[in-house]
Amino acid sequence: MLDPKAGGVPAGFFDVSRVLNYPKPPKLSISATRLQLRMEGFMGLLTFAKHVGASIFGATEAKAAPAEELKKAVEQHGLDASGVNIAVDGDKVTVSGTTASTEQAEKIAVAVGNTIGVQTVDNQIAPARVDPPSKFYTVQKGDNLWKIAEAEYGHGKGGKNDLIFQANRPMLSSPDKIYPGQVLRIPPLG
């Protein structure tokens, strides 16, 4: 039975999205044996266009590169993946372990996902410091960082495009080098 005073949340439960100050409620799925909480865009399942991105040795459009090669690619971006485990199952990659911050965990997930052959990344990394989570945006044809900032932060906020660029460094070497299908981190405004 739903308790209207609790905003439609069943009596005896609480709204996790309010506790985490997360903009959209998490998706819940219940099975007979367990309750599973999956928060898309927050240390959860991210979807990518597997036919675009960095080409890594051993990858095809049908399957991701081997885990060792993906980890090397993450480290080549200058990201500390020493506490991170990567597992590959066809076009699905699971990243787990620990990082220093939410930002690092998100960057690792995006770096892995923006490679040929990766359709989904299940981000199970536990950050030592939890920061407000980023949103994720899939670049469309004709996009640029100014346009994305206007769409994500609101009209008149295109000047915040450098915030998006900085949030995606070192994967982005230039604000002009984005491509359709690429997934970008959109950090919250400070």
Image: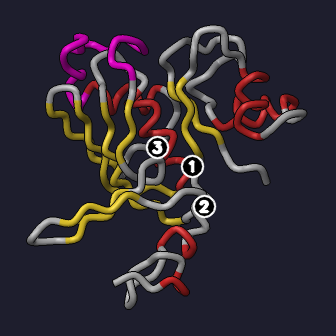
Question: Circle 2 is placed at which residue position?
Answer: 131
The answer to whether marks 1 and 2 mark residues whose Cβ atoms lie closer than 8 Å is yes
Mark 1: give few (<14), some (14-19) or many (20+) Cα within 10 Å: many
Q: Position of residue 160 (x, y in %)?
A: 82, 35
Q: Nearer the viewer, mark 2 or mark 3?
A: 2
**CA gap, disc 1 to disc 2?**
7 Å
Is 59 colored magenta in this rendering?
A: yes
Residue 142, given in percent of the width and then of the height, sits at 66, 9
User: What residue lies at 71% left-to-right and 12% top-to-bottom?
Assistant: 176
Residue annotated with mark 1? 103
Instruction: State which region is magenta.
Output: 49-68
Q: Quadrant location of residue 170?
A: top right
Amino acid type of the residue tagged 1 in the rendering? Glu
| Residue 117 image position (x, y, % from top left) | 27, 18
Q: Amino acid at mark 2?
A: Asp
In this orientation, which residue lies closer to the viewer: 150 or 5?
5
